[in-house]
């Protein structure tokens, strides 16, 4: 009898553990933000627009549609290239390699503001908090080409 109780107890604990792990995974996925969740502010995007015009538009075009030698920063090709990566990945690419004529010359705040302008131009919604300037924080925001 004690053996049966021990076996039933073990299976019960295993089931609770399995359901708990599934629940934790679902909760983690639910907490994953995307750019569709309003991760920048209108004010931040407005600060980024003149920076983009000055530092980026000569290569990426005034409307962010791309130029002769640089890709567009909005639209289907951009979405396909960055889908399922993070805003941290995009931010680091900008921070380390842009502008092409003077890589790494922009501050973290300037890069975050330009990224906010790009998100606004891509018609992703603004929110109540600014994009952070820390890559680790931006790594928590996934770029998703499809609205969840």
Image (cartoon, helix red, strand yellow):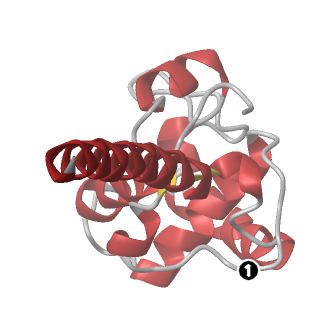
In this picture, residue 77 sits left or right of residue 64: left
- The percent position of residue 26, horizontal first and vertical second, equals 53, 45
Q: Residues within 10 Å of mark 1 (few under 14, many from 20)?
A: few
- The percent position of residue 113, horizontal first and vertical second, equals 61, 71
Which of these two is toward me, 26 or 95?
26
56 is higher (above) or lower (below) than 122:
below
139 is higher (above) or lower (below) than 3:
below
- The percent position of residue 101, horizontal first and vertical second, equals 28, 55
User: Which residue is labeled 1 in the image?
Assistant: 129
- On the question of residue 18 being in view, the answer is yes
Tally of numbered discs: 1
Q: Residue at x 39, y 60 (%)?
A: 139
142 is higher (above) or lower (below) than 101:
above
Q: Quadrant of the C terminus?
A: top right
Q: Residue at x 51, y 77 (%)?
A: 110
Query: Element under label 1?
Result: loop
Which of these two is toward me, 63 or 78?
78
Which of these two is toward me, 60 or 43?
43
- The percent position of residue 34, horizontal first and vertical second, equals 61, 49
- On the question of residue 99 being in view, the answer is no
In this picture, residue 90 sits left or right of residue 3: right
In this picture, residue 63 sits left or right of residue 133: right
Residue 43: name its quadrant: bottom right
Q: Residue at x 25, y 54 (%)?
A: 97
The outermost residue toward the left is: 3
Q: Residue at x 64, y 32 (%)?
A: 74
The outermost residue toward the front is: 1
């Amino acid at each position: 009898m004690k053996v049966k109780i021990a076996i039933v107890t073990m299976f019960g604990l295993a089931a609770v553990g399995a359901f708990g792990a599934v629940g934790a995974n679902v909760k983690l996925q639910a907490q994953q933000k995307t750019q569709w969740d309003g991760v920048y502010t209108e004010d931040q995007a407005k600060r980024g627009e003149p920076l983009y015009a000055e530092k980026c538009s000569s290569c990426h075009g005034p409307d962010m549609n791309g130029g002769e030698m640089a890709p567009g920063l909005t639209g289907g090709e951009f979405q396909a290239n960055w889908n399922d990566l993070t805003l941290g990945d995009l931010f680091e690419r900008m921070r380390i390699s842009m502008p092409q004529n003077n890589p790494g010359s922009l501050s973290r705040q300037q890069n975050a503001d330009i990224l906010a302008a790009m998100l606004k131009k891509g018609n992703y919604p603004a929110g109540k908090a600014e994009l952070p300037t820390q890559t680790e924080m931006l790594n928590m925001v996934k770029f998703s080409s499809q609205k969840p």
